[in-house]
């Protein structure tokens, strides 16, 4: 049987009794990095054979692991931190188990996107997780800013200010949150507009692991009616109605002919 076991995302105390019992009783632990997992196992005095299972050997290791599972071996899968399969190895193995009708279960525990959602105070009823935020992804960011619920994404400390700057350009009023070093000594969650957070992180260079959250809403141009948008575009950019129609169609993702028809109705 396969067990997907969530492990701490910083504070080694954040592990449940079931997870520890499973790591204690299984015959093999598949790890993203055996050195990282050894730190956790040593902390709890668990001595168990480990084998690497990461993005570079996942497809190669799969057949062997499936054979062992078929033979009735008790195997736990952990990642370096948090919940396996969430931007971490494991999904291929889960899908192969389903395909081969091999039993598996998941032992719940820390998961950084969910932890960050709790700290943000943003809508928890509707949210989307997008993995790492896109690089130079204005188009994708626009789409994220049109999502009505909370958007949760991973970001690196090096890229954080750039991404906040792009968010500021697209929607200066939107509330965002940066959850950093969660469960660790320097845990912090900062909330505000992108420009407020830029000001802070320009002064205090961001370090460590980061989850960026965007509160739900609409892009400013989506809140305007078509007529209001056409008027505003002409006024702001000093362009003709024809040019404003072209731009509005792009912004509203509508066919130009539909915008033209409404503008002349
Ligand atoms: N599977 C993991 C989980 O469930 O949390 C996520 C793995 S993903 C490869 C690693 C990313 O998770 C980091 O780059 C960071 O964005 C986020 N992360 C992990 N631990 C974190 C922490 N303690 N504080 C803030 N972000 C964290």
Image (cartoon, rainbow, N blue to C red):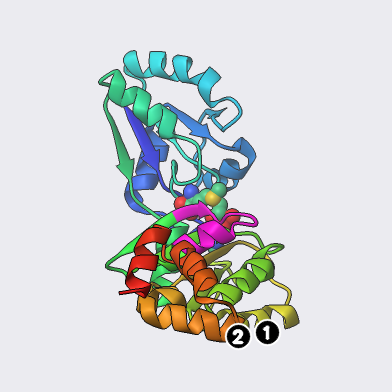
Rounded to the nearest angstrom, the CA distance separating label 2 from label 1 is 5 Å
For the residue carrying disc 2, how many other residues have a C-alpha within 10 Å: few (<14), some (14-19), or many (20+)? some
| Image x and y of residue 239, in percent | 58, 78
**Who's the residue at 33% across and 15% down the image?**
70
For the residue carrying disc 1, how many other residues have a C-alpha within 10 Å: few (<14), some (14-19), or many (20+)? few
Q: Which residue is mark 1?
A: 199
Tell whether circle 2 marks a residue whose Cβ is less than 8 angstroms from ligand 1: no
Q: Nearer the viewer, residue 254 or 20?
A: 254
Left or right, 39 with reference to 6? right
Q: Quadrant of the N terminus?
A: top left
Q: Nearer the viewer, residue 203 or 17?
A: 203
Q: Which mark is residue 28?
A: none
| Image x and y of residue 252, in percent | 41, 66
**Who's the residue at 54% across and 18% down the image?**
60
| Image x and y of residue 136, in percent | 65, 57
Asked if one can make out residue 81 in the rendered structure from this viewpoint, the answer is no
Q: Nearer the viewer, residue 108 or 216?
A: 216
Q: Quadrant of the C terminus?
A: bottom left
Q: Which residue is mark 2?
A: 196
Asked if one can make out residue 49 in the rendered structure from this viewpoint, the answer is yes
Q: Secondary structure at mark 2?
A: helix
Q: Secondary structure at mark 1?
A: helix
Report the span colored magenta. 130-143
Tell whether circle 1 marks a residue whose Cβ is less than 8 angstroms from ligand 1: no
- Asked if residue 44 is positioned above or below residue 182 in the image, the reply reads above
């Amino acid at each position: 049987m396969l067990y997907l076991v969530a492990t701490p995302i910083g504070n080694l105390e954040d592990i449940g009794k079931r997870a520890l019992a499973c790591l204690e009783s299984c015959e093999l632990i598949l790890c993203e990095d055996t050195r990282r997992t050894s730190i956790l196992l040593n902390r709890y005095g668990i001595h168990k054979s480990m084998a690497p299972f990461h993005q570079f050997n996942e497809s190669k290791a799969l057949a062997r692991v499936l054979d062992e599972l078929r033979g009735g071996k008790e195997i736990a899968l952990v990642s370096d931190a948090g919940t396996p399969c969430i931007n971490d190895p494991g999904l291929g193995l889960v899908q192969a188990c389903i395909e081969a009708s091999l039993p598996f279960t998941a032992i719940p525990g820390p998961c950084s996107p969910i932890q960050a959602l709790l700290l943000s105070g943003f809508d928890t009823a509707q949210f989307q997780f997008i993995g790492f935020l896109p690089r130079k992804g204005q188009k994708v960011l626009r789409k994220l800013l049109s999502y009505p619920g909370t958007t949760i994404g991973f970001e690196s400390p090096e890229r954080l200010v750039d991404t906040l700057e792009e968010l500021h350009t697209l929607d200066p009023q939107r509330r965002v949150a940066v959850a950093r070093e969660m469960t660790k000594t320097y845990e912090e969650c900062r909330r505000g507009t992108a420009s407020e957070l830029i000001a802070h992180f320009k002064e205090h260079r961001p370090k460590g692991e980061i989850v960026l959250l965007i509160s739900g809403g609409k892009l400013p141009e989506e809140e305007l009616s078509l007529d209001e948008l056409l008027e505003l575009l002409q006024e702001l950019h000093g362009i003709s109605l024809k040019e404003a129609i072209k731009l509005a169609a792009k912004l509203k993702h509508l066919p130009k002919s539909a915008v033209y028809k409404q503008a002349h109705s």
